[in-house]
């Protein structure tokens, strides 16, 4: 397979976080973003990567010259700005296959490229766009498709509760742009006029998605790449209650200090087994002991810091902890009310509740999951977190 990577962006919005480098070379988890993208493409089977370059092209060419890999890398430099479309057309002249993937060099989208190519051929499309389902977004424009998977419209950026967004991965006929002007935008001047024509297909993908174009998402990419959250996972998120699931309950009392915290039998091993199955593992827990004045927020934080350190040492992870300390059952964040799940979805918009699981030990947890549209499992003494982890691991063992 061949692909063109648009790697000439300046990264103006990242100036506060990144030195004077092309955006594709912004360091993420200790190495250039383009390095991670190229590794991913090689693992997916690409043997020719064409880099479309502009701003600070010398830096990218130096990176390409030093890289030792199986894929052949070709650098194509614009002598003057040609827009995304003009840059792609120039780069496509270095390709030999009839259909070529196009990717943005500041975006990572874990697409099944072989499946997307098969979909592209099935639809006999001039171009196919990879589309990412998202919730509660306003940074991206929504893309709509008909029942056959053909793109019907591109909508301007606006607040959306759910929808499909352009993931920045395209499959294009190599000669599709030859009649276009010298300078043009691939999205605005080529794709948008094709919407509704039946010649533009939309391939839905649940893969990990990140666009490092703004500082907040650039920082999130660093955390995700360091933890491995970008890799393919069978599930999006595991939401865990804490007391009775991770640690032993104290009947009529609360865990108020590290000395009172006792891991449930097998909980540490369970979290190690669950780590490769879920892109995100978060805790959603009511901690009324703080609200009742029996412990301080600082005590709770100390407990959680110690707990997470033990979990990491055992080979597991907790990506984030969401806590409601209020004593009022009407508080929207207090389970079984769903405020905390909306915080999770706002922090991680690539999570699909239907591709997630909640594990809890109470009726309140199960009602919380039901209201949020999340599949749930009840954890008990005989059917604890470890037995759940073993069942799930077995079901995903080839």
Image (cartoon, rainbow, N blue to C red):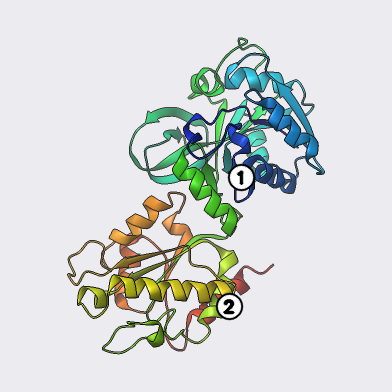
Q: Quadrant of residue 335?
A: bottom left
Is label 1 in a helix, a strand or a loop? loop
361 in relation to 251, above or below: above
Q: Which residue is mark 2?
A: 390
Q: Is residue 338 visible?
A: yes
Residue 206 in sight: no
Residue 150, x across and y down, in percent: 52, 32
Q: Residues within 10 Å of mark 2 (few under 14, many from 20)?
A: some
Mark closest to the chain's N terminus, 2 or 1: 1
Horizontal placement of 234 versus 140: left or right? Answer: right
Image coordinates for residue 294, horizontal then vertical, percent: 23, 81
Horizontal side of residue 252 vs 127, given as left or right:
left
Task: Give the x, y percent position of residue 246.
Answer: 44, 79
Which residue sits at x=61%, y=28%?
127
Quarter of the rendering occupied by the C terminus? bottom right
Residue topped by disc 1: 111
Mark 1 residue crowding within 10 angstroms, few (<14) / some (14–19) / many (20+): many
- Pointers 2 and 1 in contact (CB under 8 A)? no
Q: Where's the N terminus, which quadrant?
A: top right
Mark 2–mark 1 Cα distance, whole angstroms, equals: 28 Å
Q: Is residue 281 above or below residue 53?
A: below
């Amino acid at each position: 397979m061949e692909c063109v990577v648009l790697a000439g962006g300046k990264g103006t919005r990242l100036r506060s976080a990144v030195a004077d480098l092309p955006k594709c070379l912004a360091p993420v988890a200790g190495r250039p973003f383009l390095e991670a993208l190229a590794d991913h493409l090689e693992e997916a089977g690409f043997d020719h990567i064409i880099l479309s370059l502009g701003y600070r092209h010398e830096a990218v060419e130096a990176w390409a010259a030093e890289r030792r890999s199986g894929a052949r890398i070709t650098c194509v430099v614009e002598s003057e700005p040609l827009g995304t479309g003009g840059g792609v057309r120039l780069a496509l002249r270095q390709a030999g296959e009839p259909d070529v993937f196009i990717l943005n060099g500041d975006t990572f989208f874990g697409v099944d490229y072989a499946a997307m190519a098969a979909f592209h051929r099935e639809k006999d499309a001039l171009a196919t766009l990879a589309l990412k389902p998202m919730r509660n977004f306003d940074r991206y424009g929504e893309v709509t498709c008909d029942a056959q998977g053909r793109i019907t419209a591109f909508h301007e950026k606006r607040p959306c509760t759910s929808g499909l967004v352009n993931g920045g991965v395209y499959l294009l006929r190599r000669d599709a742009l030859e009649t276009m002007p010298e300078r043009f935008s691939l999205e605005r001047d080529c794709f948008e006029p094709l919407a509704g024509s039946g010649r533009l297909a939309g391939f839905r993908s649940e893969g990990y998605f990140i666009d490092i174009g703004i500082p907040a998402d650039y920082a999130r990419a660093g955390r995700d790449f360091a933890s491995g959250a970008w890799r393919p996972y069978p599930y999006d998120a595991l939401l865990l209650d804490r007391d009775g699931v991770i640690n032993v309950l104290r009947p009529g009392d609360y865990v108020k200090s590290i000395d009172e915290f006792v891991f449930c039998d097998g909980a540490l091993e369970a979290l190690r087994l669950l780590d490769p199955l879920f892109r995100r593992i978060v805790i959603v827990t009511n901690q009324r002991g703080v609200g009742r004045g029996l412990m301080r927020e600082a005590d709770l934080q100390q407990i959680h810091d110690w707990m997470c350190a033990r979990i990491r040492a055992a080979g597991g992870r907790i990506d984030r902890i969401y806590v409601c300390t209020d004593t009022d059952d009407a508080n929207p964040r207090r389970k079984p009310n769903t405020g905390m799940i909306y915080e999770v979805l706002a922090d991680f918009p690539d999570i699909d509740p239907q591709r997630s699981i909640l594990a809890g030990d109470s009726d309140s947890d199960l009602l919380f999951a039901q209201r949020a549209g999340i599949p749930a499992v009840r954890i008990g003494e005989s059917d604890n977190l470890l037995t759940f982890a073993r069942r799930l691991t077995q079901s995903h063992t080839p």
